[in-house]
Amino acid sequence: YSILLILLPTVPAADIIAPLTAAMRGLNYMKWAVVCDVTCSVVYFAGIFILVPRMGLTGTAVSQVAASVVQALSAVLLSRREGLYVSGGGPAMLRALAVSVILAGGGAAACAAWGLPAAAACIVLAPFLLRTAVKRLFLFDHAEAEMLLEMLRGRPGSGLVRWALSLER
């Protein structure tokens, strides 16, 4: 269970990595996508060799978290270099990555310390934390939020997305 809690921050990192590396590959920036992947592998395997002898299986999970965060940072920075998004997107993505990893890590630590009650509290609080983060980090301007909602129109969960983006009507 503790290994899964340690791995929890890799989920938000993957949410940032996947679309950026897919855009890189789709726009013929394959070399930068490969750099992101190789960077991830180097950090992971270096972590394995350094941490596993000291921490055992937990060291493997810590290595994966470090590799995911480094890969996400690489993807954001290389995407910015190649102009794959407007100038304001990079800082917003980095803020989103930092907050996501901190919240996931904090939630994992709370669950490890306090068990099931903390897990239930994290599940209940997650939508409110999402809404606050989206609002405070200025991830979407009104036009972008409306475009996202238009793509989701009529699909399950679109009401939750509208609420999270603070666009209730």
Image (cartoon, rainbow, N blue to C red):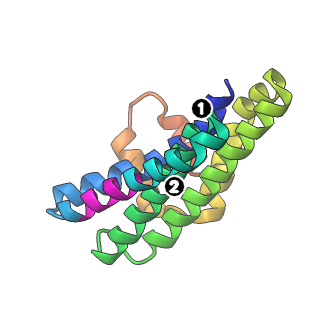
Type of the residue with mark 2: Val
Q: Is residue 168 visible?
A: no
Q: Position of residue 65 (x, y in %)?
A: 55, 46
* 31 over 14 or under it: above or below: below
Region rendered in magenta: 32-40
Q: Which residue is mark 1?
A: 57
Q: Position of residue 145 (x, y in %)?
A: 46, 55
Q: Position of residue 55 (x, y in %)?
A: 66, 39
For residue 5, side relative to residue 106 (left or right): left
Nearer the observer: mark 2 or 1; the answer is 1
* 117 over 127 or under it: above or below: above
Q: Quadrant of residue 160?
A: top right
Residue 34 on the magenta segment: yes
Residue 35 on the magenta segment: yes
For residue 158, side relative to residue 56 (left or right): left
| Dot placed on the residue nearer the N-terminal end, 2 or 1 | 1
For residue 119, side relative to residue 35 (left or right): right
Q: Quadrant of residue 38?
A: bottom left
